[in-house]
Image: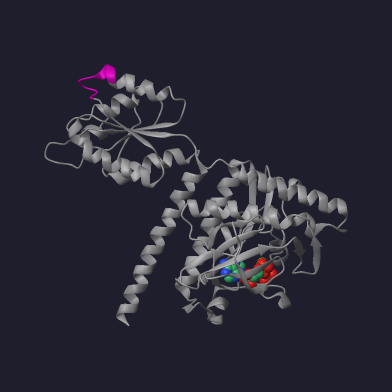
């Protein structure tokens, strides 16, 4: 891809920001080979760091985008350059911690290293190198009355950024956990899109942004901390560090986002096809593939069991969704003949349908019952999400999006009343 680099807008410790010719809404983030610590007091050069950091960041932001987080990332434009939405940056570092370590222990004497925060601990730091990035309370951020790209940073904006920070942490924590690595803490930044006014996760997230402890063991750390801690930055220290940065990028590049699983929607009668189509559509929005079958457990028991065996034979996780209205024999028969989860979702109640036939199951059966197509899809997705970090994250971000929608509607009501 041809880079159309325009004027340099800013140069920080680790990257340069450049305009993109003829695209005023976009910027290039060109990573340098610099590595810094202790607010720039310790400086080093790591050949190839710009490329490895950009690779890491591109995978992280693609992943966040795929699970529904709004970010400034557009694409990786060159090995060491990202193409991003041009933002007016909020000068705050948003830090989330799962495990107490590092500066938290110094600021909170008495807390033992290893203390686990549940929910993750959120801390804010004002970006000011001259003052060593002081910790700020939310009240201080409000008092600063930042206005970015014409958008005042008030309580609503603050809450949105706080909740998004914790969501981003949870999403990346799951990803790393599936690779056997503990995400201990993490820093992100936000910007306001210059063109749309939307609040976006911006700047970068790379191996300088977090602490990573494989198997939760601090001694195995893979992040920048060894550079901060080293008494002398010897060539050996730098060599090991580079290996760690490359290891982190390789893990992320090799991460398999898509897991195989399938929801199998079985209807007792073809007259329930519309209801099943709705379930399938909700599943598809969540990124879950589904098969739709017709089989009556009353009239074609053998065929029903053959269908169960067919999906059990795929070797992949399956959730059965039983759609039967009048007398639901289907769900309980499935449940009694497979160890996979069975969710009953009888079609919209009519005089003819009997929800209780789904609820009153024989002893020894554990199928559940929901009434709405969306609920069936979400319940099935939650089953798969137990072993699928990407799907789990999509569900988590969906909750954040629901909250953000309500919060925006509330803000609109308040504005209308003024
Ligand atoms: N999407 C973006 N749009 C505009 N500016 C950005 C964007 N992402 C990052 N920046 C800004 O780029 C500058 C350079 O980054 P960096 O080298 O990390 O600086 P610093 O040393 O101040 O952290 C910072 O001022 C950062 O806020
Ligand atoms: Mg920075």
Q: Residue at x 37, y 42 (%)?
A: 379
Q: How many marks?
A: 0
Magenta-colored segment: predominant secondary structure: loop
Q: Residue at x 65, y 44 (%)?
A: 251
Query: In the image as oriented, which residue stretches furthest toward the front?
Result: 2
Compare residues 140 and 147 and report the one nearer the observer. 147
Look at the image and tell me in which quarter the C terminus lies.
bottom left
Please tell me whether residue 298 belongs to the stretch shown in magenta: yes
Please, which colouring scheme is shown?
Answer: one colour
In the rendered view, does 148 fall on the left or right side of 31? left
Q: Quadrant of residue 407?
A: bottom left
The residue under the point 30% across, 80% down is 417
298 vs 287: above or below: above
Residue 307 percent location from the top left of the image: 33, 22
277 lies above or below 43:
above
x, y (%) of residue 201? 54, 63
**The residue positioned farthest toward the top in the image shown:** 302
Task: Report if residue 216 lies within the magenta region.
Answer: no
Give residue 108's quadrant in the image.
bottom right
Measured as percent of width and height from the top left, residue 264 is found at: 34, 32
**Looking at the image, which residue is at 50% across and 73% down?**
194
343 or 357: which is nearer to us? Answer: 343
Q: Quadrant of the N terminus?
A: bottom right
Can residue 99 be seen by looking at this rendering?
no
Image-based side of 41 in relation to 133, left or right: right
Measured as percent of width and height from the top left, residue 197 is found at 46, 72
The magenta segment: 296-303
């Amino acid at each position: 891809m041809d880079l159309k680099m325009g004027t340099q807008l800013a140069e920080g410790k680790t990257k340069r920001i450049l305009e993109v010719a003829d695209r005023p809404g976009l910027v290039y983030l060109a990573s340098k080979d610099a590595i810094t610590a202790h607010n720039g007091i310790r400086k080093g050069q790591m050949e190839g760091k710009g490329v490895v950091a950009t690779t890491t960041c591109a995978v992280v932001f693609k992943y966040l985008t795929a699970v529904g987080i709004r970010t400034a990332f557009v694409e990786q434009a060159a090995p060491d350059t990202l193409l991003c939405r041009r933002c007016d940056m909020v000068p705050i570092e948003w830090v989330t911690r799962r495990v107490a370590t590092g500066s938290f222990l110094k600021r909170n004497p008495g807390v033992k290293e290893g203390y686990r925060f549940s929910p993750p601990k959120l801390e804010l730091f004002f970006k000011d190198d001259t003052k060593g990035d002081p910790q700020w309370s939310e009240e201080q951020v409000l008092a600063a009355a930042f206005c970015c790209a014409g958008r005042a940073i008030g309580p609503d904006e603050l809450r949105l950024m706080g909740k998004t920070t914790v969501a981003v942490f949870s999403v990346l924590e799951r990803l790393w956990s599936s690779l056997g690595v503990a995400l201990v803490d993490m820093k992100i930044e936000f910007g306001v899109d210059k063109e749309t006014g939307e609040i976006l996760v911006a700047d970068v997230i790379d191996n300088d942004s977090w602490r990573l402890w494989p198997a939760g063991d601090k001694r195995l750390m893979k992040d920048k901390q060894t550079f901060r801690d080293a008494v002398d930055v010897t060539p050996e220290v730098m060599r090991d560090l580079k290996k760690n940065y490359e290891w982190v990028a390789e893990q992320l590049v090799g991460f398999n986002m898509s897991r195989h699983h399938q929801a199998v929607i079985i209807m007792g009668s073809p007259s329930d096809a519309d209801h099943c189509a709705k379930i399938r559509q909700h599943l598809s929005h969540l990124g879950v593939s589904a098969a739709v079958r017709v089989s009556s457990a009353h009239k074609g028991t053998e065929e029903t069991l053959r269908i169960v065996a067919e999906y059990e034979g795929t070797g992949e996780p399956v959730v059965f969704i039983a759609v039967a209205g009048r007398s639901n024999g289907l769900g309980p028969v499935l449940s009694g003949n497979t160890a996979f989860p069975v969710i009953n979702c009888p079609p919209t109640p009519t005089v003819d349908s009997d929800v209780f036939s789904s609820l009153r199951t024989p002893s020894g059966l554990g199928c559940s019952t929901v009434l709405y197509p969306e609920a069936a899809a979400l319940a099935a997705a939650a089953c798969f999400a137990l072993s699928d970090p990407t799907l789990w994250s999509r569900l988590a971000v969906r909750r954040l999006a629901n909250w953000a929608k309500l919060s925006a509607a509330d803000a609109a009501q308040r504005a209308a009343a003024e």
